[in-house]
Image (cartoon, helix red, strand yellow):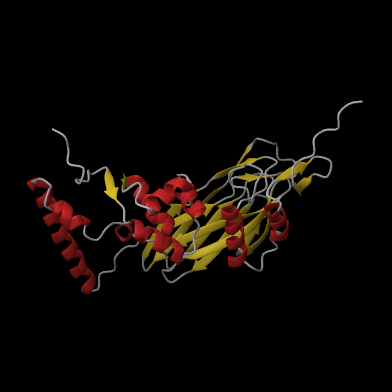
Amino acid sequence: MQRDKDVITEATLRLDAAAIKRIREQQELTQLYVARMVGVTTDTISRWENKQFPTVKRGNAERLAAALEVELEEILPREAGAASAQDVPRQRRCYWLLLAAATVAVILLVLFGVRQRRQVQAQRVLPSYASAGAVIPVQLRISGSDHGVVREKLPVGWHFVAAVPPPASVDERSGVLRWIIHSSGNMAQIVYLAKVADDAQRNAMACFSGEVTARNGNERMRTELIGAECLVIDHINWADLNGDCVVDDDEMLDASYISENAPDLPLDLDSVEQLWIEDHYYWDDSGGCFKPGIKPSAAPEK
């Protein structure tokens, strides 16, 4: 028997398109940034915001909520639960009744002073590419912790340049950076600059690793930094996320967002703007740098 199109299976969820767009704009996040965090294309994000893909897999919905830094329920239609409850089997209705009772019990515990445990979330945002010897920005976002210690390990041969806020310690030999964060439960953001090894091999992968040891009251939790872990060494500017030798408007906005959130960092945004203004750019082998415009063709042999 064919399933009714209005019934949402356990594997999919219906999205609130207006809520997704509103939250993303309030957070000042670009579609490109959200797409990278979820692992989809910007076209998919646009379709979600315009009701062209009304339902998605639960995993994508959860990653979308994490990228927007909200709870999953905030990007789902408020009436979805009531509408679907009329069509689900009796067994599922009992399940939801039991779940509602459990929720009430949790609320009562909170009212009597039992502290709810918050899940610590820690994400790393990296460029897709970097050239040997370049200085690139890395973003770390930590939420759900009153205070804790962030530990980040750079790829072999890389060097720390600067950070906002400054790290509590830097071990140049091992490439380990540490921060002590105090966020009072709000999201803590760290932006740091790292210099790629001068002898980094082209087309090789450079990988990061890190973790957060956090404490909420008497609870101690440890979680790994998730999100981007590796980037590709190539003759591609760090702001060019898709590697097409063009810094487009969305990519320029992402680069500007990093600079605005860490204005004291020595990030060379002017050179990125030059590549953006000229549309295309290329790697100049003789100068060992990026130049705006189309790469000149080799002179014909006489």
In this rendering, the answer to whether 288 lies above or below 69 is: above
**Residue at the extreme bottom:** 112
In percent of width and height, residue 111 lies at 21, 73
The residue drawn where x is 50% and y is 57% is: 30
Pick the front one: 291 or 215: 291
Q: Quadrant of the N terminus?
A: top left
Classify residue 69 by image quadrant.
bottom left
Is residue 106 toward the left or the right of residue 58 in the image?
A: left
Is residue 68 toward the left or the right of residue 210 in the image?
A: left
* Figure label count: 0
Classify residue 269 by image quadrant.
bottom right
Q: Is residue 144 visible?
A: no
Q: Quadrant of the C terminus?
A: top right
In percent of width and height, residue 182 lies at 49, 70
**Residue at the extreme top:** 302
In percent of width and height, residue 155 lies at 63, 45
**Residue at the extreme right:** 302
In this rendering, the answer to whether 189 lies above or below 243 is: below
The residue drawn where x is 43% and y is 72% is: 184
Pick the front one: 259 or 197: 259
In this rendering, the answer to whether 72 lies above or below 218 is: above
Q: Is residue 138 visible?
A: yes
Is residue 297 toward the left or the right of residue 195 in the image?
A: right
In percent of width and height, residue 150 lies at 52, 59
The residue drawn where x is 16% and y is 65% is: 104
The residue drawn where x is 47% and y is 60% is: 142
Classify residue 162 by image quadrant.
bottom right
Pick the front one: 142 or 280: 280
